[in-house]
Amino acid sequence: MTRLIAAALLMLAGLALPATAAEVGDDGLHKTDWMRQTFLDLREDLAEANAEDKRLALMVEQRGCIYCKKMHEEVYPDPELSAYIRENFFVVQLNLHGDREVTDLDGEVLPEKDLLRKWGILFTPTVIFLPETVEEAVPAKQAAVAEMPGAFALGTTLDMFTWVNEKRYAMENEEDFQRYHARRIRERQAAQED
């Protein structure tokens, strides 16, 4: 009831209700409206992402992960970030300890937990960003253009998704992510001072 009253007051003031944290599914993982339910054939997911002119991102999480919870309660609900992910990324969630069968880009079929062990994923959350095209026998982890291991603040997360989406990793003489992120921090600080 309190949320309804808050929503009504914000609407009267001409403001939107802030985004809320994602629901938790039966598997104990947070679910957002920008995550895709697929058959977990990463080759098909990559083709579908390309058909939608989006980038494929694999989000690895696990039940009870306090850092996953932090991201879903404090970072991903931000309207700007959430909209950016929804508009530019095809996100497939994988469970670090899951048993669903996944077909890797190299064609190997393994349960999630074995695939993620094959890739050397140790921490959650981890987001693996893939390019638009991948050579036939290359596993997704090897093909990745960037990886975001762990929980980060809103600015870092938005900058990483932007850096990948703009393909800055592939630009000759372009800033690496750390320099790009440092520049974006300075730009945001300057904008606040104006």
Image (cartoon, rainbow, N blue to C red):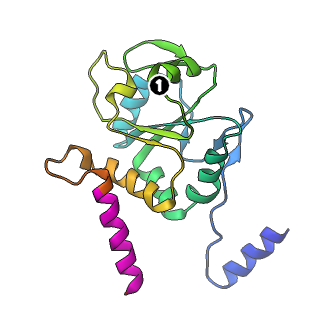
Q: In this view, does 123 lie to the left or right of 188?
A: right
Along the viewing direction, whichever of 86 and 70 lies nearer the viewer: 70
| Mark 1 nearby-residue class (10 Å; few <14, some 14–19, many ≥20) | few
* Residue at 70% in and 47% down: 23
Dot 1 amino acid type = Gly
Secondary element at image label 1: loop
Residue 186's x, y, as percent? 34, 71
Q: Does residue 58 lie above or below 186 as drawn? A: above
* Residue at 67% in and 38% down: 29
Along the viewing direction, whichever of 139 and 132 lies nearer the viewer: 139
Residue sitting at the far right? 1
Residue 92's x, y, as percent? 51, 35
Residue sitting at the far left? 172
Q: Is residue 121 left or right of residue 162?
A: right
Residues in magenta, as a range:
179-193
Q: Indicate whether residue 129 is drawn in magenta.
A: no
Q: Indicate whether residue 191 is drawn in magenta.
A: yes
- Quadrant for the C terminus in the image: bottom left
Along the viewing direction, whichever of 119 and 34 lies nearer the viewer: 119
Residue 137's x, y, as percent? 31, 15
Residue 124's x, y, as percent? 57, 38
Q: Main secondary structure of the magenta part?
A: helix
Q: Name the residue under label 1.
A: 120
* Residue at 44% in and 12% down: 108
Q: Does residue 185 lie above or below 22 as drawn? A: below
